[in-house]
Image (cartoon, rainbow, N blue to C red):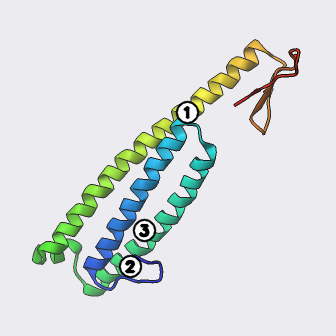
Amino acid sequence: MNSSERPSTLREILDAERECCRALAEVVERERVAASTHDLASLLASNKAREATQAQWRRIADLRRSSLRTAGRTLEELAGEDGRLAEARDDLVRMSTQLQRDQRVNAGLVRAVLQSVTGLIDSCERELPTSRYGQDATLSSGVRPSGGLAFSA
């Protein structure tokens, strides 16, 4: 769905929500790869894409709720009368359930990555108490090896 288009029927609204779910699943996959490879730039880009997609999905979900209020009926009632609507609803439920699982996996992965980086920094600080980890991701030991080498993550 183009951002200037606005779905008008409940079926179109559910299709637009499924498209948002599909797009968000792609973002979550890119996010997983970025976190596992420690690619900060890609992780930040994924977070921006996630925010934009979630905002679009919220707008469409608001449109669905408004449409149902106007109809004075629940989605379940309408889906009970229209098999295609029921199919779209069931598909959206399946997709969003899988997306929630994938997001939990990513949250665990990001926590693990952050803990490993924190553990590495802590180890360096224990072994080299004068070391510092700078904002530019450079670890300086306070003791300069010959040749002036520094470790950069």
Q: Residue furthest front?
A: 147
Q: Secondary structure at mark 2?
A: helix
Identify the image quadrant of residue 23.
Answer: bottom left
Q: Is residue 43 left or right of residue 146?
A: left
- Disc number placed over residue 57 in the picture, else none: 3
Residue displayed at 47% across by 78% down: 3
Q: Residue under circle 2?
A: 63
Vertical arrangement, residue 149 with respect to residue 74, above or below = above
Q: Measured along the vertical axis of the image, is residue 47 above or below residue 121?
A: below
The amino acid type of the residue labelled 1 equals: Val
Q: Earlier in the sequence, mark 1 or mark 2?
A: 2
Of the numbered discs 2 and 3, the one sitting upstream in the chain is 3
Amino acid type for the residue under numbered disc 3: Trp
How packed mark 1 is, by other alpha carbons closer than 10 Å (few <14, some 14-19, many 20 or more), is some
Q: Residue 152: percent from the left, percent from the top?
A: 74, 30
Which image quadrant for residue 115?
Answer: top right
Q: Which residue is mark 1?
A: 113
| Relative side of 84 to 33, left or right | left
Compute the Cα span from label 2 to label 3: 10 Å
Q: Verify CB contact (< 8 Å) between mark 1 and mark 2.
A: no
| Residue appearing at x 35%, y 72% in the figure | 16
Identify the residue at image location x=45%, y=74%: 59
